[in-house]
Image: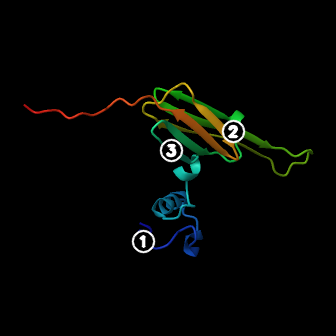
Amino acid sequence: MAGLIPFNRKNNALARSTTGFEDFYNMLDDFFSDSLLSGRSLLRDTFKIDIEETETEYLIDAELPGVSKEDIDLGIEDENLCISVSRSEEINKDGKNYVHRERRAGSMSRRIRLANAKLDGITAKLEDGVLTVTIPKDKAEPHSRKIEIE
């Protein structure tokens, strides 16, 4: 789709004159861009997860670099696993003549539907920025069957 735009207005010298529509043009350029680095992206705004299903359990790995276990809220409800991360950080430097100070806060969450998940025996471990959740499965009941026609 990037072929639909003859040039990127953000990098074009002709677009440096202000018209009042720069944000709109940048949004359009970002929308049609093939680049993974421009604009907001679901890949950057949430954490990545891997889900593996075996005969007896679900194995979920969530990448959460730099997150402590105190910042994670983990729960299961109605066959849905919910992983929520809420972080608030503040960069302070001692001294009274601040030239620059930053504060940042954010939250992310993912919900995963896991059929036949057992509530007992769930384990979770956070190690090297990867949250690993193991959820045992109940005996699966058949959800389909053949219907005979008379």
Residue with the mark numbered 2:
87
141 vs 16: above or below = above
- Amino acid type, mark 2: Arg
Q: Nearer the viewer, residue 38 or 125?
A: 125
Going from N to C along the chain, the mark reached first, 1 or 2, is 1
Going from N to C along the chain, the mark reached first, 1 or 3, is 1
Quadrant housing the N terminus:
bottom left
The x and y percentages for residue 18 are 58, 65
- Helix, strand or loop at disc 2? strand
Q: Is 96 situated left or right of 29 in this image? A: right
Mark 1 vs mark 3, CA separation in Å: 35 Å
Going from N to C along the chain, the mark reached first, 3 or 2, is 3
Mark 3 vs mark 2, CA separation in Å: 24 Å
- Helix, strand or loop at disc 1? helix
Give me the residue at 56% from left, 36% from top.
Answer: 134
Give me the residue at 75% from left, 41% from top.
Answer: 89
The x and y percentages for residue 142 are 32, 31
Q: Nearer the viewer, residue 54 or 135?
A: 54
Residue with the mark numbered 1:
3
Frontmost of labels 1 and 3 is 3
Q: Pointers 1 and 2 in contact (CB under 8 A)? A: no
Residue with the mark numbered 3:
51
34 vs 136: above or below = below
